[in-house]
Image (spheres, grey):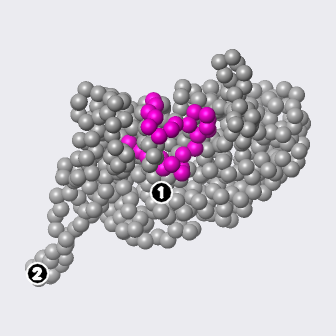
């Protein structure tokens, strides 16, 4: 069997290549260039030339052929242009997920196949296994092709299965993940023992194949800057908002014991961790009885339609006439920004607004009106949501044999961003989409991101929020 390893110059793909060679496979390496330094304003260089140099040294050390392929055109069209388009709509895409679906296991695979490859391998921390029935026999699809499943990487600190959540069974059938069973320290140890040139190379950061960027600066290449208002939303807004009252009353009506549903997360960040607090326990019968229209509304965020009236007043001893905003009990205009499309839900940095005891967080953006709404403190009501929806056309089942049908209700564990601890949730399939109802309120649910659900270690499916 001939295997093409995607060699990036990093330690993970280097060890993956070394292991395949040790296992006796016919291996060759291919380095893909997906970005050009001149195409973006970066924090430093993309350094792809250095990465290619290291990758070539690794291939020489292992004793495998080395090839180079330029996939920058496909990457721009299928990843970067999509990313710009999503941000322009006020959504937050995940380019790394798209890179795997559209480039590494599609365009890259096609280039490898032309060089005679039967499979492609990468340095992802995840595992792939055939699906077996109760008798240990392979399970196949309707066409007789064997089915595969993706499992989380053995190293809980490095699990990268989330980034592969959009792979199809056809793509999985050609994929290998040689280091999925290893811990990161073990990978480093193997690299040192094999004297690989990448043994001490730091892990890459930033956007896949673009590198570490100042995102607003990067997006300003195509998205026009336009000043707008930053509006702080006060707690009183939620007391009088019809959608927030609907969310509170409906969620509370679904709890198993009739208790008031919790709607504010204790979550702070992946780095700091958090206590989940009291989980909401929902009654399956009540969930099943909830109409589709109510599920749709339950998944929608609180809208922000604050208006600010002006008044004139005289100031100073010369009584100069000036204009100011009247006080609004629901919020206040507290600053200016350079474009709502440059901000995302849950964002704290980049607001540059002082005068608050706690940090300000973005709780909503309105691209059409060019407004961003913020709230003070991580317990602000606008940061938390309990339910999200994945539209039918955005649903992707890695295991099509386990796809949910309308009316089904299942319990899975879900994450809505990479490195987020898995969250307990109830998944409800309806004709108008898949609804994910979390036991604990979630912070920063963001349109455009991917929700991914797991059964134990197995990743079953994903969808765009």
Mark whose residue sits in front, 2 or 1: 1
Is residue 9 found left or right of 314 in the rendered image?
right
Residue 142 or 299: which is nearer the viewer? 142
| Residue 90 placement (x, y as % from top left) | 45, 60
Local secondary structure at mark 2: loop
Locate the N terminus by quadrant.
Answer: top right
Extreme residue toward the top, this view? 135
**32 is higher (above) or lower (below) than 3:** below
Image point (45%, 29%), residue name = 411
Image point (84%, 40%), residue name = 118
| Mark 2 or mark 1, earlier in chain | 1
Q: Is residue 440 visible?
A: no
| Residue 221 placement (x, y as % from top left) | 57, 68
Q: Which residues are magenta?
A: 387-411
Image point (52%, 37%), residue name = 404
Residue 260 falls in image quadrant: top left
Local secondary structure at mark 1: loop
Image point (26%, 55%), residue name = 233
Is residue 177 found left or right of 454 in the rendered image?
right
Residue 354 or 166: which is nearer the viewer? 166
Identify the mark at residue 319; answer none if there is no mark: 2
Residue at which label 1 appears: 91
**168 is higher (above) or lower (below) than 180:** below
| Residue 354 placement (x, y as % from top left) | 31, 56
Q: Is residue 454 visible?
A: yes
| Residue 18 placement (x, y as % from top left) | 81, 32
**15 is higher (above) or lower (below) than 383:** above
Residue 3 or 59: which is nearer the viewer? 3
Does the segment drawn in magenta span residue 157? no
Is residue 124 found left or right of 114 in the rendered image?
left
Is residue 105 found left or right of 56 in the rendered image?
left
């Amino acid at each position: 069997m001939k295997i093409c390893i995607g060699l990036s110059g990093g330690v993970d793909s280097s060890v993956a290549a070394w292991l395949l060679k040790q296992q006796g496979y016919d291996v060759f390496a291919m380095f893909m260039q997906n970005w050009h330094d001149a195409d973006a304003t970066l924090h430093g260089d993309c350094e792809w030339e250095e990465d290619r140099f290291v990758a070539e040294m690794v291939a020489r050390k292992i004793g495998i052929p080395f090839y180079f392929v330029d996939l920058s055109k496909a990457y721009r069209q299928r990843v970067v242009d999509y990313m710009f388009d999503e941000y322009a709509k006020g959504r937050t895409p995940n380019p790394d997920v798209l890179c795997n679906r559209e480039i590494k296991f599609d365009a890259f695979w096609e280039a490898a196949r032309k060089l005679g490859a039967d499979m492609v391998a990468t340095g992802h921390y995840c595992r792939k296994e055939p699906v077996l029935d109760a008798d240990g026999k392979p399970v196949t699809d309707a066409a007789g092709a064997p089915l595969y499943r993706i499992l989380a990487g053995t190293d809980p600190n490095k699990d990268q299965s989330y980034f592969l959540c959009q792979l199809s069974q056809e793509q999985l059938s050609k994929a290998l993940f040689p280091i999925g069973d290893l811990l990161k320290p073990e990978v480093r140890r193997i690299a040192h023992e094999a004297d690989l040139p990448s043994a001490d190379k730091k892990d890459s950061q930033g956007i896949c194949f673009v590198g570490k960027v100042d995102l607003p600066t990067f997006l300003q290449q195509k998205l026009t800057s336009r000043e707008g208002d930053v509006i702080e939303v006060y707690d009183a807004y939620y007391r009088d908002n019809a959608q927030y009252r609907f969310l509170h009353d409906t969620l509370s009506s679904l709890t198993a014991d009739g208790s008031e549903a919790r709607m504010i997360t204790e979550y702070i960040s992946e780095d700091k961790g958090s206590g989940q607090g009291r989980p909401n326990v929902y009654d399956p019968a009540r969930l099943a009885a909830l109409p589709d229209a109510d599920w749709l509304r339950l998944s929608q965020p609180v809208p922000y339609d604050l208006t600010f009236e002006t008044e004139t007043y005289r100031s100073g001893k010369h009584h100069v006439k000036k204009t100011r905003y009247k006080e609004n009990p629901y919020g206040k205009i507290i600053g200016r920004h350079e474009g709502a499309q440059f901000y995302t839900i849950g964002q704290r940095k980049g607001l540059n607004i002082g005068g608050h005891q706690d940090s300000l967080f973005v709780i909503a953006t309105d691209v059409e009106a060019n407004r961003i709404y913020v709230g003070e403190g991580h317990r602000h009501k606008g940061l938390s949501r309990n339910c999200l929806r994945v539209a039918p056309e955005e649903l992707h089942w890695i295991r099509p044999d386990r796809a949910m049908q309308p009316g089904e209700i299942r319990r899975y564990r879900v994450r809505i961003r990479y490195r987020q601890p898995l969250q307990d949730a109830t998944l409800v399939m309806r004709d108008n989409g898949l609804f994910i109802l979390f036991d604990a309120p979630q912070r920063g649910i963001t349109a455009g991101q991917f929700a991914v659900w797991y059964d134990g270690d197995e990743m079953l499916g994903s969808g765009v929020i």
